[in-house]
Image (tube, coloured by chain):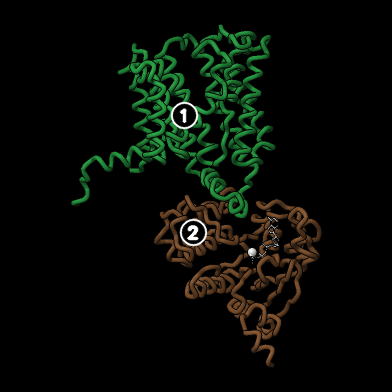
Amino acid sequence: MLKIKNINTYYGKVHALKNVSLHLNAGEIVTLLGANGAGKTTILNTLSALTPAGSGEILFEGARIEALPPDRIVKLGICQVPEGRQVFKPLSVEDNLELGAYLRYRSREGRGAIKKDLEKVYQLFPRLLERRGQMAGTLSGGEQQMLAIGRALMARPRLLLLDEPSMGLAPLIVQEIFRVIETLRQESGTTVLLVEQNAKAALKMADRGYVMETGKVILEGVASELLENKEVQRAYLGKEKKEIWER
Amino acid sequence: MKREPVKYALLVAVALLAPLYFSGGYLMNVLVFVGINTLLVVALNLLLGFAGQISLGHAGFFGLGAYISAILTATHQVNPWLVMLIAALAVSALAFLIGFPVLKLKGHYLAMATLGLGIIIYIFFNEAVDITGGPSGFSGVPNLSIGALVFDDDVKNYYLVWSFTLVVILLAVNLSRSRIGRALRAIHDSEVAARVMGVNVRLLKVQIFALSAFISALAGSLYAHVMTFVAPASFGFHFSVELVTMVIIGGLGSVYGSLLGAALLTLLPEMLRAFQDYDIIIYGLILILATMFMPGGLVRGIPAVLAAILPKKQERG
Ligand SMILES: Nc1ncnc2c1ncn2[C@@H]1O[C@H](COP(=O)(O)OP(=O)(O)OP(=O)(O)O)[C@@H](O)[C@H]1O
Ligand SMILES: [Mg+2]
C-alpha cells in the first residue's frame, strides 16, 4: 500500500532522514520505534508533505506522492494525528471533528455521509459526545488525544499516521486508545503507522515494526520477533542492563 | 427559534428605524460613518479576528477604493456603480498578489510589512499630484444615484451605506459559521494542524486577505461618494491603527462585535466634544478601561456586565 524508497529529508543543514526505506501492506499495523530525535516525527511529516523529502520516492497505492502538497495527501486518504495532539483549542469538540472532514464537504458524498461519520466517532469515543459543545482546550489530555484521533478519522483515512498517541497518558486511557486502533483495523481495514515510545504495548498490537536511530532505520521485523530482540529490549523495553549482561 | 436569524432581524429593524429618531440632527451624519467604519472593521476582523493575521495597511485599501471611485467618476465620467465594482475587484486583485509573499510573514513581521504597504499607498496619494490632487485632496466627486434618486443628504446616504453594511454583516456571519470560518479559526490556532487536516493554509490566508481588501475598497468607494471629496489624510497609518483598535474593542472574531467597536469609537469622539480639550484623555481612558475589564471585547463584555447587574430570574426556576 505504501512504499518509501530511500528518502532523505533535511531541516536546512540538518540531515534528519538518511536513506530511509520502509513499507506498509494494506490492513497492517506497523510501529515505528526509536529514541528521541531519531526522526520518527520527521517520517510522518515527510509523508504528510509538511516537510517534503529532499530526495527519494514515496509510492501510495502505486502512485508517486512525494511532490504533492499536504491537502492532496489528505485527499488521497493519508491522515496524520500529530505529535502533542494539536487540537484546535478555542474551537468546540464538534467544530474540531468537522474540520477533520474539511476536504469532504465539496466532494460528491454530501453532508449526510459526514454526519454519519460524526456519529461513528461519537460511538468510538462516547466521552466526546458528552463534551461536543465544550472548547477543545479545556479537555483533559486523554480526551484531547481521542479528539485528535477522531478528527483524523473524519477525513476517512485509509492510512492513519499516529504520532505518540500514548504520550503523557495514564495506562487505562492508553489501553482504550489502543483498543480503538485495533477496532478500526478490524471494522474499516484502516492501515496504521504508529510511532510510539511505549514500545512494549506498541509491539504487542502491531504486525511489524521498524527501529530508527539518528535518521536511519537500523532494524526491522515482525513485531513478536522485535519483542524478543535483545537490542530492542535493552534500548526500548526498559529491561535492566544487568539482566541482559548476565545472560 | 434559532438565535442567529433573530439577532440579525433585530439589527435590520433597528438600522431601518434609526433615522426616525435621529434624522435632522448631526448624529445622522455620524451614523453614516458608523456604517462605513463597520464595513471596514468587519473586513479587518475576518483577517485579524478569524484568521489571526494582522494588517496595519487597511486604510490603504480603503483609500484606494475611494480614490479609484473619485478619479474615474469625476475625471472620466464612468458609471459610479460600475467603478465601485471595478475598484473593489482591482484592489482585491492587488491584495491577492501582494498577499502571497507578505502573508508568509508572521506576527511582528507581518505587521511591519502591511504597515509598509499602507505607507507606500499613502505616499502615492500625496505625491501623484496629477492624478490624485496631492495633499490638498480631490473634490467634485458626484453623489451616487439610482434613476432620479440622488443620494445627496444624510438620510439617503444612511440608507445607501447601511444597505451595504447589513448585506456584508450577513455574509460575514454566514462565512464565519461555514466550514471556511472553521478553517480560518483553525489557522489562527495552529497552522500545522490545519495543514494536516487538508486546509491549504497559504491560499486560504491570501483569499481572506483579498476578500477583506474587497470590502475595504467598497467602503472607500461609498466614502468618496458620500463625502464628494477625498484627501490623503483620511487614509494614513493613524486610521489603520484605529481600525485595529475597533476590532479589538468590539471583539476579535465576532462580526457583531465589529459593529459595536465601530459604533463606539465613531460615536465616542462626538459625545466627548463637551469635554473640549480633555476629550482625547477621556477617550484614551475609556479604551484602557475597556481592554482591562472587557478583554474579550464589548461583544462578550457587555453581556457579562449585564448578567452581573441584572437580578437572575431563572435561578429559582
Ligand atoms: N524544525 C526543525 N528544524 C531543525 N531540526 C529539526 C526540526 N525538527 C526536527 N529537527 C531535528 O531532526 C531530528 C529528528 O527529529 P524528530 O522530531 O523527527 O524526532 P523524533 O524521532 O520524532 O523524536 P521524539 O521521540 O522526541 O518525538 C532531530 O535531531 C531534531 O533535532
Ligand atoms: Mg516525534
Q: Are marks 1 and 2 in contact (CB under 8 Å)?
A: no
The colour with which the image depicts chain A is brown
Amino acid at pointer 1: Val
Crowd band around label 2 with a 10 angstrom C-alpha radius: few (<14), some (14–19), many (20+): many
Q: Residue A167: percent from the left, percent from the top?
A: 55, 68
Q: Which amino acid does label 2 sit on?
A: Leu
Q: Which disc is residue A118 wearing? A: 2
Please, what secondary structure does the residue beneath circle 1 have? helix
Q: Quadrant of the C terminus of chain A?
A: bottom right
Dividing the image into 4 quarters, which one contains the N terminus of chain A?
Answer: bottom right
Placement of A114 over or under B238, stated as above or below: below
Would you place residue A135 above or below residue B218 in this image? below
Task: Name the chain under label 1.
Answer: B
Is residue B229 rendered to the left or right of residue B160? Answer: right
Res B192 label: none
Label 1 CB-ligand 1 distance < 8 A? no
Question: What is the secondary structure assignment of the residue under circle 2?
Answer: helix
Residue at 53 percent across and 24 percent down: it is B238
Image-quarter location of ligand 1: bottom right
Residue under the point 68% across and 70% down: A26
Colour of chain B, in one word, is green
Q: Where is residue A110 in the image (x, y as percent from the top left)?
A: 54, 51
| Label 1 neighbour load within 10 Å: few <14, some 14-19, many 20+ | few
Q: Which chain carries label 2?
A: A
* C-alpha separation, residue under disc 1 versus residue under disc 2: 33 Å
Disc on res. B167: 1
